[in-house]
Each structure stands twice: as structure tokens, then as C-alpha cells.
Image (spheres, rainbow, N blue to C red):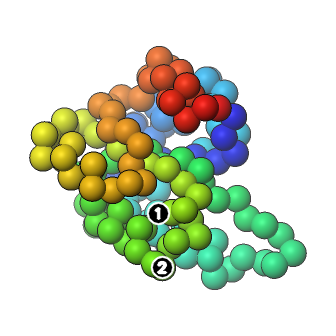
Amino acid sequence: MLEQILCIDDDPITLMLCKKVISKSEFSNEIITAQNGEEALLHFNTLKYTNNKNKVSKKPELIFLDLNMPVMGGWEFLDHFTSGDYTEFSNAASVIVLSSTIDPDDLAKAKKYPIIIDFLSKPITLPMLEYLKKKIDI
């Protein structure tokens, strides 16, 4: 079981569904959410700059990422997250793109990011999580 997962999506219903399905599957102990890439980066900045040396903050081990969001979309988030500023987090996390569109261009673009381990279609399901458990060996 993973310690912590981050779900990044602008749709509150999708976030609620992610939390319910992941909780039901015993896939992760904790599920945190962000409504866009900027909010997710703010979370990582908070971890980075307010981390008390005596207390280790949890870092998401897996990120479910939507691509099309207002404020900051998934691709822009990935560009920032895989830059040197977030290395301590991006080296410890994998990304699953969870999108409602399966555009061949997006699939090709995803292959350029080594951090992306899969590209799946919404909504998240229990069989999908079982498949991921085997894939990432949890």
C-alpha cells in the first residue's frame, strides 16, 4: 500500500470519485487533492519550505494527473515538476495521466516524460487500481 497519493483534477466529482475508489481498494493510506497544477506546486512548495527538520513530511509517491485544467494544466505542471526545483519530489513520485481524452498527440507527448508510467482514461476504477498495483508492485 502506498503512503500518499496526489490527485490533480479540476472536476470536484472526479476528485471525490478518486478518493472513494482509492480508499475502497486499499491502494493508499492517504489521498490528497489539488484542483490544478498550480495548487499542486503550492503543496510541494509548502512541503519544501516549511519542512521541520525534526519531522519528516510525507511526499506523494504517485500522482494521478488530469491534462486539461484551468490556471495550470497537466503539461505545464509536468514541466515545472520535472525541473530542478522539484527534484526531491519528482525523483520519489511517479505520474499516471488520468484524462478524459485519449489524443494520440498526448500519448506521444507523455512518452517524453520518464516520470509518466501510464496513460489511462477517466474515470478511475477498481480494476484499474488492481492493474496498477501489479504494475508498480504494491
- Where residue 76 appears, as percent x and y from the top left, is 29, 66
**Amino acid type indicated by mark 2:** Asp
- Neighbour tally class for label 2: few under 14, some 14-19, many 20 plus, Cα within 10 Å: few
The answer for how far apart the CA atoms under marks 2 and 1 are is 14 Å
The disc placed on residue 93 is none
- Where residue 31 appears, as percent x and y from the top left, is 60, 44
Placement of the C terminus among the 4 image quadrants: top right
Is residue 121 in view? yes
Q: Is residue 49 left or right of residue 121?
A: right
Disc 2 or 1, which lies upstream in sequence? Answer: 1
- Nearer the observer: mark 2 or 1; the answer is 2
Q: Do callouts 2 and 1 mark residues in contact (Cβ within 8 Å)?
A: no
**Amino acid type indicated by mark 1:** Ala
* Residue denoted by label 2: 85
Q: Judging from the image, what secondary structure is the residue with disc 2 in?
A: helix
Residue plotted at (27% across, 55% down): 112
- Neighbour tally class for label 1: few under 14, some 14-19, many 20 plus, Cα within 10 Å: many
The disc placed on residue 40 is 1
Residue plotted at (21% across, 52% down): 109
Placement of the N terminus among the 4 image quadrants: top right
